[in-house]
Image (spheres, rainbow, N blue to C red):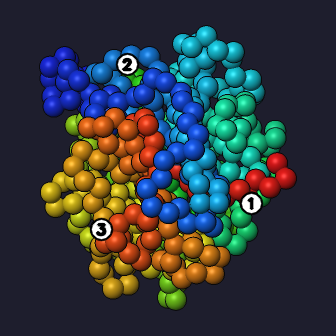
């Protein structure tokens, strides 16, 4: 396999030097862990929202080499706001206490099992900076690439590394999805030194129920996957592992591979590796998938945020080309794939009504985007009508992935609350905004004020208190 790997920049070379955009501005790490009770609220928090809005992202604890630092590799920091009976009871931010964090701060080393031997680099930090959610009554911070999850307390303190009660000895994913019918978490795991992907199912008790090893061409990064009612769907794309990146000093050993033949995998959800159908397609980078659903003619539709190219000219993060919204049609009978462009507007971090995951077709999607004046915005897509609407956060304000929470258990697909963290660079603080998904133009129904900036990061979730009952 051949590729064109980015060359190691020297100070002053390229648009990112001598600084690194993922170490400054809205990405700059915060140094302190704080706890604030009885947060100020402007507006009214919906009374039915009882639980925690959690999110996690990279927050490097020690100065990094700005030439080689990659956004994906920073130490994890979890942020949380706890809501109850219309009040914002607290905000907390806590480092995920990996070995580098505990050594730097002089804290006790985090207990728990050791990860499988990772190869020469990349997972050496053993952090968790990519997702935070609950399963089996426990709260976990996740990362991909071979790292162990970290279990957290309700108040976001690190308890221990976890191997899901001794049921798991391989890699896990940073982007699992919960089947709306069974409550199980599904994910596709990978490591840079593997030539296979591992489909993993975590049951409702938080134990690994099922694994399937799927042989691969190449060694791709597989950040996300999707569930239709029949298939586990994932992508073997052109962002591939290249150990030469490690030799050049980078801690993220992936780069664009011009020779790789990308393809989508359709694995029957209870099937075996020899039942996988591969559907080849044209090169594109796909990190995030809105969702997948089965069509009456047997094909599978997959809605994704795709980039023309990533990790070719910029090894520090996913900046080479803007993302757009595409729908892939995968045919398990023929192995054919076609693509339809749904929207050229730059958009990422897709979310939907999770009551539809693994169940049926979604109509709406919610994205982080940009307004025409380049301000950060929340974008709602109506995929049936082909229309969209947005809410712009304002100059110097940066919104993050918005989580959809249904207003009631049986409310309509877009009848619910959109909740997101927004950082304000000018004021050095942040807010949690709550908007009704059917009335973005009306603005937030509540603003929860946080006296500290929340750096731009990756994923989060709403964890209602009933998910943790009895724990």
Q: State whether residue 176 appears in this view.
A: no
Percent position of residue 261, x then y: 36, 54
- Mark-to-mark CA distance, 2 and 3: 36 Å
Where, by quadrant of the figure, is residue 435 drawn? bottom left
Q: Which residue is mark 1?
A: 466
Marks 1 and 2 sit apart, C-alpha to C-alpha, by 40 Å
Counting residues from the start of the chain, the first of labels 2 and 3 encountered is 2
Residue for badge 2: 64
Look at 85% across and 53% down and name the residue there: 470
Please name the residue shown 33% across and 85% down the image: 385
- Residue 372: x and y, percent? 16, 61
Q: Residue furthest bottom?
A: 296
Q: Is residue 339 left or right of residue 436?
A: left
Earlier sequence position, callout 1 versus callout 3:
3
Horizontal and vertical percent for residue 398?
32, 47
Label 1 to label 3: alpha-carbon separation: 31 Å
Q: Residue at x 29, y 47 (%)?
A: 397
Which element carries disc 1, helix, strand or loop?
Answer: helix
Callout 1–callout 3 Cβ contact below 8 Å:
no
Q: Are marks 2 and 3 in contact (CB under 8 Å)?
A: no
Determine the image quadrant of residue 275: bottom right
- Residue located at (70% from left, 72% from top): 181
Q: Residue most toward the right?
A: 470
Instruction: Looking at the picture, tell me which residue is in the foreground, 293 or 205.
Output: 205
Q: Is residue 150 left or right of residue 247?
A: right
Can you tell which mark lies on residue 22? Answer: none
Give coordinates of residue 252: x percent, y percent: 41, 30
- Per the image, label 2 sits on a secondary structure element best described as loop
| Of callouts 1 and 2, the N-terminal one | 2
In terms of depth relative to the viewer, which is nearer, 143 or 457? 457
Q: Which residue is mark 3?
A: 390
């Amino acid at each position: 396999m051949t590729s064109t790997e980015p060359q190691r920049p020297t100070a002053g070379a390229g648009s990112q030097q001598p600084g690194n955009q993922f170490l400054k501005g809205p990405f700059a790490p915060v140094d302190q862990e704080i706890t604030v009770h009885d947060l100020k609220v402007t507006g009214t928090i919906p009374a039915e929202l009882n639980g925690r809005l959690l999110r996690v992202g990279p927050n490097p604890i020690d100065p990094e080499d700005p030439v080689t630092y990659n956004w994906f590799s920073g130490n994890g920091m979890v942020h949380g706001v706890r809501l109850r009976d219309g009040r914002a009871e607290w905000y907390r931010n806590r480092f995920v206490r990996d070995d580098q964090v505990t050594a730097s701060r002089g804290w006790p080393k985090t207990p728990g099992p050791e990860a499988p031997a990772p190869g020469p680099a990349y997972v050496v930090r053993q952090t968790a900076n990519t997702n935070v959610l609950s399963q089996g009554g426990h709260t976990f911070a996740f990362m991909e690439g071979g790292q162990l999850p970290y279990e957290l307390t309700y108040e976001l303190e690190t308890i221990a590394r976890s191997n899901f009660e001794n049921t798991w000895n391989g890699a896990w994913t940073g982007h699992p999805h919960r089947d709306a019918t069974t409550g199980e978490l599904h994910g596709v795991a990978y490591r840079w030194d593997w030539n296979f992907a591992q489909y993993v199912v975590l049951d409702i008790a938080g134990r690994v129920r099922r694994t399937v090893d799927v042989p691969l061409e190449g060694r791709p990064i597989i950040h996300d996957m999707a569930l239709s009612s029949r298939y586990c769907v994932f992508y073997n794309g052109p962002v591939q592992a290249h150990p030469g990146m490690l030799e050049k000093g980078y801690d993220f050993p992936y780069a664009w591979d011009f020779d790789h033949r990308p393809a989508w995998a359709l694995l029957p959800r209870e099937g075996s590796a020899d039942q996988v159908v591969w559907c080849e397609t044209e090169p594109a980078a796909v990190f995030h998938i809105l969702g997948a659903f089965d069509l009456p003619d047997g094909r599978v539709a997959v809605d994704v945020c795709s980039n023309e190219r990533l990790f070719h000219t910029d090894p520090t993060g996913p900046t080479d080309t803007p993302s757009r919204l595409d729908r892939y049609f995968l045919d398990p009978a023929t192995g054919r794939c076609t693509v339809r462009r749904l929207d050229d507007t730059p958009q990422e971090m897709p979310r939907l009504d999770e009551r539809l995951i693994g169940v049926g077709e979604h109509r709406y999607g919610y994205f982080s985007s940009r307004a025409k004046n380049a301000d950060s915005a929340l974008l709602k897509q109506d995929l049936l009508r082909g229309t969209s609407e947005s809410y712009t956060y304002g100059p110097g304000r940066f919104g993050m992935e918005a989580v959809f929470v249904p207003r009631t258990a049986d409310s309509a697909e877009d009848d619910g609350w959109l909740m997101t963290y927004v950082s304000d660079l000018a004021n050095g603080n942040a807010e949690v905004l709550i908007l009704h998904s059917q009335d973005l133009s009306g603005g937030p129904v509540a603003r929860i004020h946080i006296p500290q900036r929340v750096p731009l990061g990756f994923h989060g979730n709403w964890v209602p208190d009933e998910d943790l009952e009895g724990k």
